Image (cartoon, helix red, strand yellow):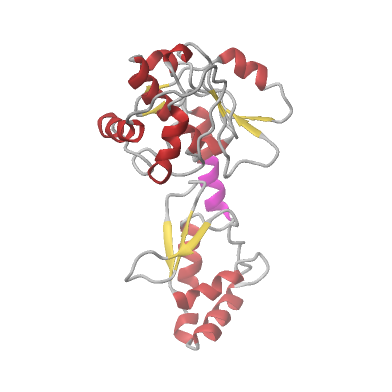
Amino acid sequence: MILPRLRTNLDFMVSPVADRPGLLIRDCFRYSDAKLIVPPPLIPGLLCFDGLRSDVDLQEELTRSSGSPEFGRTAGYLIEALSQAGFLEDETYAKLKENRLSAFIQSPVREAAHAGSGYPAEIGPLRTVMQHYLQGAVSTQQGVIGIAAPHVSPEGGWQSYHAAYQELTPDLRDRTFVVLGTSHYGPSNKFGLTRKPFETPFGRTRIDAALVDELKTQPAVLMEDYCHAVEHRSNFKSSSCRLFTDQMCASFRSSADHLAEAFSTADFRKTTSM
């Protein structure tokens, strides 16, 4: 039996679990929720999943690399584990991907993919964290037409976020915000645009539909890019803007109402988000 290819769009890293050494594999696209830790003796066998070699080749490689026929006999278990996790280019993966893409397209909103991991998912704890980050923020500029915030996790770069978001002032509350976010997973040379409002712990953003309709006609735009289902940068930006306008303007729905959507690999949004 020819082995299917191991997917090339997976995350591979050293296992962080002290008592389970090996190679941790997870799906950064979230087609699959599975995480596998491949023990050190089985790691060389992953090279056999190239679409060319067979299960016999895998068994021989595991026996050779480990020096023990016992490990060679685990070839079947490795194949089954990788397939069931959705990590091989086979029917299991195709179905998982199809289901995820369909769910994203049918969803009425762009979910906060990293709420609860990258930042608190509940409004109370998140407000406390964000107010700490933005404490003492005072605008230093006049006539701001844009701000640049870092491409870094909130906890690691909050001072930079503080410096950027302090320039959002109450007079901007009725403006359309265009949010450009780095796309880790979208296709190159494209702007991933979504018509979906962004769901955040502070509420749901409102779309500038006219701007979306204008932008979607551009050849560089990819509508409803699936990268929105897994990206976090633009979603965090919208949460930041929402809290900041709430804190500074006493009006969450006004200024971040116009916060949310329209471009996106970036992420365009009223916020237009790209």
- Whether residue 96 is visible to the viewer of this picture, yes or no, is yes
Q: Which residue lies furthest to the front in this view?
A: 140
Number of marks in the image? 0
Please state, as top left, top right, bottom left or bottom right, where the C terminus lies in the image: top right
Asked whether 64 or 94 is in front, the reply is 64
Q: Which residue is drawn at 57% across and 15% down?
A: 209
Q: Residue furthest right?
A: 219
- Left or right of 248, for residue 78: right
Q: Where is residue 263 in the image (x, y as percent from the top left)?
A: 59, 26
Q: Where is residue 260 in the image (x, y as percent from the top left)?
A: 49, 22
Q: Residue at x 48, y 16 (%)?
A: 258
Whether the magenta-drawn stretch holds residue 11 is answered as no
Please state, as top left, top right, bottom left or bottom right, where the N terminus lies in the image: bottom right
Asked whether 36 or 179 is in front, the reply is 179
Q: Where is residue 91 in the image (x, y as percent from the top left)?
A: 56, 52
The part of the image, by quadrant, that contains residue 89 is bottom right
User: Most prominent secondary structure in the magenta stretch?
Assistant: helix
Q: Where is residue 85 in the image (x, y as percent from the top left)?
A: 46, 56
Whether the magenta-drawn stretch holds residue 98 is answered as yes
Q: Residue furthest bottom?
A: 67
Range drawn in magenta = 90-99
The part of the image, by quadrant, that contains residue 2 is bottom right
Q: Which residue is drawn at 35% across and 39% down?
A: 119
- Left or right of 173, for residue 202: left
Note whether 146 is above or below 160 in the view shown. Answer: above
Asked whether 120 or 175 is in front, the reply is 175
- Whether residue 74 is visible to the viewer of this picture, yes or no, is no
